[in-house]
Amino acid sequence: MPAVSICTEPFRLAADAMARSYGFPGFDYVVTEHPVASLSRDEVRERVATMLPRILELLGVEG
């Protein structure tokens, strides 16, 4: 099943380190602002809307 990893900015270094340790240096993922847990439902929707073009790009879906 196609999937895209998403992490917040403070976890970017950890995401890159994990990708390298699992043999995927340069692994593409989406980065969003931190925090996420405190966002309202509408704020999450707005955040997703801004990430959606990149998510679709990583999935290979033409917009």
Image (tube, helix red, strand yellow):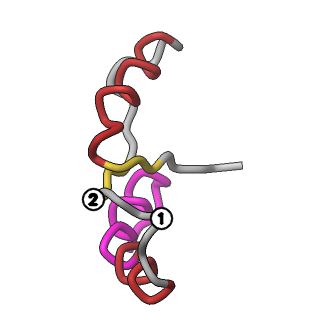
- The range drawn in magenta is 49-63
Helix, strand or loop under label 2: loop
Measured as percent of width and height from the top left, residue 6 is found at 45, 50
Residue 24 percent across, percent down from the top left: 45, 19
Relative horizontal placement of residue 22, taking residue 32 as reference (left or right):
right
Q: Mark 1 highlights which residue? A: 37
Residue 61 inside the magenta-drawn segment:
yes
Q: Which residue is mark 2?
A: 33
Check disc 1: other Cα within 10 Å, few if <14, some if 14-19, many if 20+. Answer: few
For residue 5, above or below residue 55: above
Residue beneath the point at 32% across and 50% down? 31
Number of residues whose C-alpha sits closer than 10 Å to that of mark 2, classed few (under 14), some (14–19) or many (20 or more) = few
In reply to whether residue 9 is colored magenta, the answer given is no
Residue that extends furthest to the front in the rendered view of this protein: 38
Q: Main secondary structure of the magenta part?
A: helix
Q: Is residue 37 above or below residue 44?
A: above
Q: On the image, which quarter does residue 63 sit in?
A: bottom left
Amino acid type of the residue tagged 1 in the rendering: Ala
Q: CA distance from mark 2 to mark 1?
A: 11 Å
Residue found at x 38% / y 26%: 14
Q: Amino acid at mark 2?
A: Glu
